[in-house]
Image (spheres, helix red, strand yellow):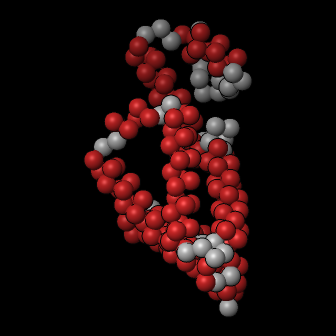
Amino acid sequence: MAYRDEMLKNGDSMDGCAGLEAVDSFSEWMDFEKRLKARYKKDDHRKENFGREGSMWFIFALGSSMFAALTSILAKVGIEGVDSTLATAVRTSVVLFMAWGMVLFTGTLSGITKIGKTSWIFLILSGLATGASWLCYYKALQLGAASKVVPIDKLSVVITLVLAALFLHETFTAKSIIGCILIGGGTLLMVL
């Protein structure tokens, strides 16, 4: 009875949950739990993408794109008369300080001992790829116009989708293929 009352209090529908008030054994509860999970399974994708709790990824992704745009403009101005490698080192030092500051602020430092060997390897490789990307990006910004460098840099979206399909076995849908073509075509249109 308490489970039923809790669900109703939270505004959840009781459709398909008939007999909940009569659940009085562990096996009956397990059966009910399976029915409930099956009922809500179809909503998982929608909740994961746009549900109340699942929408934070979208907010952070928008924040990332806004800060990335700001980074490009600030970098183009800041790199004037500065060696691109030195500029990358200065930027990386700031990012390093900020990232460890967030780890300390959020209290997640203790998790460092739980990182497995495979994760360490791939995090280090990711860091090396990030460093190489930033070195290339700053050199390109030093030599070219931000309005041309940034769209080419964003071809990483297309490359990421292809690599994700090849190595992570993520599905390439008609929508993602069309998106890749449009991003690639839009990039060429902007830089030519």
* Residue at 41% over, 32% down: 110
Please say whether residue 177 is visible from this viewpoint.
Answer: no
Q: Nearer the viewer, residue 191 or 182?
A: 191
Q: Nearer the viewer, residue 161 or 47?
A: 161
Q: Nearer the viewer, residue 109 or 166?
A: 109
Q: Quarter of the image holding residue 79?
A: bottom right
Q: Residue furthest bottom?
A: 192
Q: Residue furthest front?
A: 81
* Residue at 64% over, 83% down: 144
Please say whether residue 93 is visible from this viewpoint.
Answer: yes
Q: Position of residue 123 (x, y in %)?
A: 38, 54
Q: Is residue 21 above or below residue 154?
A: above
* Residue at 68% over, 53% down: 63
Q: Is residue 175 above or below residue 8?
A: below
**Left or right: 149, with 163 as reference point:** right
Work out which quarter of the rendered image holds the N terminus and state it.
top right
Work out which quarter of the rendered image holds the C terminus and state it.
bottom right
Q: Position of residue 2 (x, y in %)?
A: 59, 9
